[in-house]
Amino acid sequence: MNSEVLKSKLRSVFLRKRLELSEEKHEKLSFDIANQCLKLPIWDFEYFHLFLSIKSKAEIDTSLILTMLQGRDKQVIIPKVNRNNLEHILLTDSTKIKVNSWGIPEPDKGILIDPRDLDVIFIPLLGYDKTGNRVGYGKGFYDNFLVKCKPEVVKIGLSFFKPVDKISGVHTNDIPLDFCVNPKEIINFS
């Protein structure tokens, strides 16, 4: 898939590719991505925003990254969908995780964290290009969220796959990634 690709085509192609991964391959690639994350220049930061994986969409298993963050005593913030926006909840020992009507695991309730306090954000995506533009599910949750963060927040995409050359239909308000981690490498867009 080279040259310019429409967002809608990317969504369907990469979702299909993820869903076609065997359970064993999915697990191995998720493990490889988590290991690549250890090489990122982020480990001096304190506040990490991490999405929990939607199993029905075969998203990368972020539980390994969560374990690494907790093992390094980082503050982990988990998103919760509230109508058309995301809330950001501090993960604590007493946080209860429930699956919402879209199949997204999220905190039931908890301590709200201001997006401006975040240092690093791991971002779910379906596809991305060689300049750091990404394609999500098209609801705009992360675009709306990222504009509320401080400009220097580190934005990291996670993908099983390599980037396409260029995504067409990128809007001026789309915020590109700083890095994308795939099983083989970390791509630095800055």
Image (cartoon, helix red, strand yellow):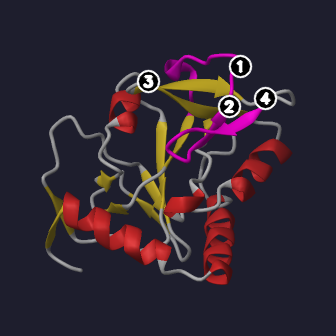
Going by the numbered disc 3, the residue's amino acid type is Lys
Q: Residue at x 62, y 47 (%)?
A: 52
State the extent of the magenta-drawn residues as a range: 96-119
| SS at badge 1 | loop
Q: Nearer the viewer, mark 2 or mark 3?
A: 2
Judged left or right of residue 89, residue 129 is: left
Residue 59 x/y as whole percent: 54, 61
Q: Are marks 4 and 2 in contact (CB under 8 Å)?
A: yes
Q: Are marks 1 and 4 in contact (CB under 8 Å)?
A: yes
The reply to whether residue 151 is visible in this rendering is no
Q: Residue at x 33, y 35 (%)?
A: 143
| SS at badge 3 | loop
Judge the density around disc 4: few (<14), some (14-19), many (≥20) Cα neighbours within 10 Å.
Answer: some
Quadrant position of residue 84: top left
Q: Earlier in the sequence, mark 3 or mark 4?
A: 4
Judged left or right of residue 127, residue 29 is: right
Query: Which residue is label 4 attached to?
Result: 95
